[in-house]
């Protein structure tokens, strides 16, 4: 498992999300400007709704920027116990404890990037290879940690 390549892939996914959000912000601002110049005061509600959407997108952009900062700090060393930056193979599936970015495919490797604050990650933290963990009363075991 080459965690440096996996980290790059995760960063790429986060950057794609950031670019997408920035494009949506730009398009929504353009719509808001079009509304201001072509419609009268009776459409103030529409402008306010567009402004609320812009504010929501700005908040999402801020969250993604924070994720990118955290992802930059991801260690690529192998861990003996599960921690931030661990790639974990379990009987439930493979997980990359980094940021919540969903499914990630890198060649024939499939995993889910989860936040260290997620309930699953909290359940896994500090555990070692071969240990068991519970998810909704079902026992699963840790196969490998990278």
Image (spheres, rainbow, N blue to C red):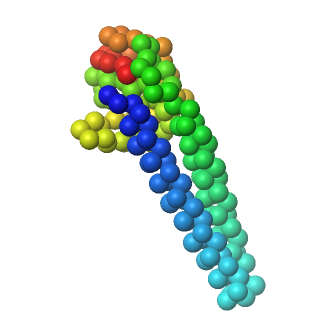
Labels in figure, total: 0
Quadrant assignment, res 137 = top left
Quarter of the picture holding the N terminus: top left
Whether residue 134 is visible here, answered yes or no, is no
Q: Is residue 7 above or below residue 86?
A: below
Residue at image location 43% in from the left, 17% down from the top: 79
Q: Residue furthest left?
A: 108
Q: Is residue 27 above or below residue 21?
A: below
Residue at image location 36% in from the left, 19% down from the top: 145
63 and 137: which is toward the camera? 63
Quarter of the picture holding the C terminus: top left
Quadrant assignment, res 101 = top left
Q: Position of residue 119 (x, y in %)?
A: 49, 27
Whether residue 60 is visible here, answered yes or no, is yes
Q: Position of residue 46 (x, y in %)?
A: 66, 76
Residue at image location 64% in from the left, 72% down from the top: 29
72 and 64: which is toward the camera? 72
Q: Is residue 101 above or below residue 98?
A: below
Horizontal arrangement in the rendering, residue 103 relative to residue 27 (left or right): left
Horizontal arrangement in the rendering, residue 73 relative to residue 89 (left or right): right
Q: Position of residue 95 (x, y in %)?
A: 38, 30
């Amino acid at each position: 498992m080459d965690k440096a390549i996996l980290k790059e892939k995760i960063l790429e996914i986060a950057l794609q999300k950031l670019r997408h959000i920035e494009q949506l912000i730009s398009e929504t601002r353009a719509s808001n400007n079009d509304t201001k110049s072509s419609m009268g005061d009776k459409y103030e509600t529409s402008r306010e709704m567009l402004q609320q959407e812009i504010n929501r997108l700005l908040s999402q952009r801020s969250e993604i920027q924070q994720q990118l900062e955290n992802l930059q700090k991801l260690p690529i060393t192998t861990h003996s116990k599960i921690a931030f930056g661990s790639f974990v193979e379990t009987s439930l599936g493979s997980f990359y404890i980094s940021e919540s970015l969903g499914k990630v495919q890198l060649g024939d490797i499939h995993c889910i990037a989860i936040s260290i604050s997620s309930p699953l990650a909290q359940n896994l933290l500090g555990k070692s290879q071969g240990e068991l963990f519970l998810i909704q009363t079902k026992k699963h075991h840790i196969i490998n940690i990278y």
